[in-house]
Image: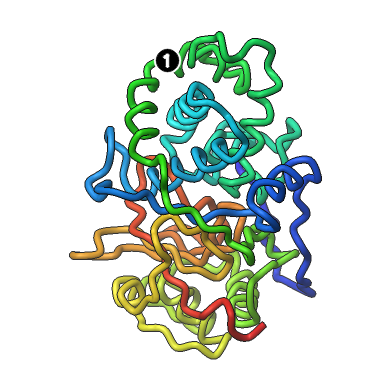
Amino acid sequence: MILKVAGAMVGVIVLIPILIGSGVQGAISAVFGSSSSLDCTPTGDTSNGVAGYGREQLANAATIVAVGTKMSVPEHGLVTALAAAMQESTLINLGHGDRDSLGLFQQRPSQGWGTPAQIMNPTYAATKFFEHLLAVPGWQSMTVNDAAQAVQRSGTPNAYAKHEPAARAVLAAVLGANCTPSENALVGTGDCNAIQTPNRAAFAAINYACGQRGLPYVWGGDGPHEGGFDCSGLTKAAYGAAGITLPRTAHTQFHAGPRVPVGQPLLPGDLVFYGNPNTKIRHVGLYIGGGLMIDAPDRGQVVKIEPYRYPSDDYAGATRPVNRDLLH
């Protein structure tokens, strides 16, 4: 089930810290220092993808492998984790799933895997997977499929085996990836009543957009005075409330940048785009954390919160209109 957020007008909004579960946070800190997140970039020629997986997916695979390597997980375990993530999410950090499943491994907050925001942090999610795998008696003598199933407990228990060849190819491609700790990583809450942002400008933009929930989609709409918004009208007005001027259309906003590097975790306040960068960016939303965005989706719909990723979407990337080191 997708995380739902009330649609009422925002009142008082406060900044609150994300609290990572002490066990997993301890494991992450032990291997990566004080960071709770990694930015990973595969080395070598992976520009055209590997085994059918693109750059974003390989960056997520590199994070999984980096976490497992630092936890001294042998190759069998790394392949198992990659096969599990391939089956569950196609190595895309999904903000939705069956019931309340989320993230690379489709872990469920209701089953004790963590908060939605924690699970949407690939470093956290990978650490949780490996902790569970290492606790399975005799997992190293199991097949990749059975080891993955012992952790995931899927309703399709034999679904992981088919991913083993691709998992081995991806493992070979991402071993030795450049991974750096994100010391100031901020996953965000995805909750308009508990906004968490890296700076005041992003806070102001999200705060404004949250206040527009329920307004109808209006083609060319720039605000309540016109009855509602279209997608880029909403993001332009939101950042206008923060004192930052954006171009009017989704396509020009995308090319205005600055671009968030592929594989780098999104921050609340980032703009997320869909379409073809070379021909037409067709849609834009405002990322608010927890795998969620607020946007004006289409005719007949209203400004609302929804997941920012689906397996079949045409996600083009993200921009960060304000430097996260400014305006704290």
Using the image as rendered, state which of residue 272 and residue 306 is in the foreground: 272
At 34% across and 50% down in the image, what residue appears? 43
The residue that appears at 59% across and 38% down in the rendered structure is 126
- Few, some or many residues within 10 Å of mark 1 (<14, 14–19, 20+): some
The extreme left residue here reads: 279
Task: Please state which of residues 174 and 290 is positioned toward the viewer in this rendering.
Answer: 174
Which secondary structure lies at badge 1? Answer: helix
Report which quarter residue 87 is drawn in.
top left
User: Where 303 falls versus 149 (above or below)?
Assistant: below
Is residue 3 toward the left or the right of residue 259 in the image? right
Q: Which residue is painted at 53% across and 24% down in the image?
A: 77
Dot 1 amino acid type: Ala
Q: Quadrant of the N terminus?
A: top right
Is 95 on the left-hand or right-hand side of 83?
Answer: right
Residue 226 placed where, x, y %? Answer: 47, 81
Q: Residue 96: x and y, percent? A: 55, 42
On screen, residue 122 above or below 138: below
Q: Would residue 101 be found to the left or right of residue 45 on screen? A: right
Identify the residue position indicated by label 1 in the image: 161
Please tell me how many numbered marks the rendered image carries: 1
Percent of width and height locating residue 120:
59, 47
Of residues 188 and 225, the one nearer the viewer is 188
Q: Position of residue 206 (x, y in %)?
A: 60, 72
**Closer to the camera, 172 or 257?**
172
